[in-house]
Image (cartoon, helix red, strand yellow):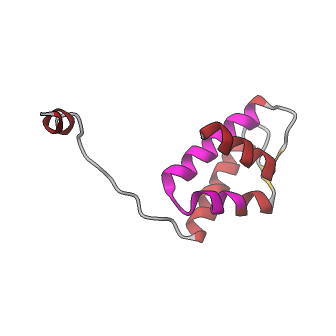
Amino acid sequence: MYKCQFQSRVGFVHQYRVLDRQEQSELIQEEMRLLTSVGEGKIEKDAIALIIRMTGGKFRQMESLLAEIHRIMQINEDMDVVSKEVVEAAREQLA
């Protein structure tokens, strides 16, 4: 009974493959370009490495983490660089 109700509400399912390091790096750089348009946009190399380690190439996790980083940077207008601490704060907010 529950299976039929659930299936009637799902139009399609898409499984994302794990991103390679190059794709992850490009996605992070694109997000930094978006941050640049609102006044931020710099990111430490350690922060990039931490994002890649935390998400393991999983697209949905990376998108969520980057969106939270973006939100934190907008709230804290005095910050102009994404550091490891910002990435860790974003992860804690998502947990």
Question: Image check: 17 left or right of 27?
Answer: left
Above or below, 40 relative to 47: above
Name the magenta segment's main secondary structure.
helix
- Image coordinates of residue 34 in percent, x first then y, are 66, 44
Does the rendering let one see residue 90? yes
Does the rendering let one see residue 69? no
Question: To which quarter of the image does residue 56 belong?
Answer: bottom right
Q: Residue at x 72, y 40 (%)?
A: 37
Q: Nearer the viewer, residue 1 or 32?
A: 1
- Image coordinates of residue 22 in percent, x first then y, are 59, 70
Question: Image check: 9 left or right of 48?
Answer: left
- Quarter of the picture containing the N terminus is top left
Question: To which quarter of the image does residue 75 belong?
Answer: top right
- Quarter of the picture containing the C terminus is top right
**Is residue 68 in the magenta section?**
yes
Question: Image check: 87 left or right of 12?
Answer: right
Q: Residue at x 17, y 34 (%)?
A: 2
- Give, as a single range, the part of the protein colored magenta: 50-74
**Is residue 81 in the magenta section?**
no
Above or below, 5 relative to 69: above
- Image coordinates of residue 81 in percent, x first then y, are 83, 47
- Image coordinates of residue 90 in percent, x first then y, are 68, 42
Q: Residue at x 76, y 47 (%)?
A: 41
Q: Nearer the viewer, residue 92 or 73?
A: 92
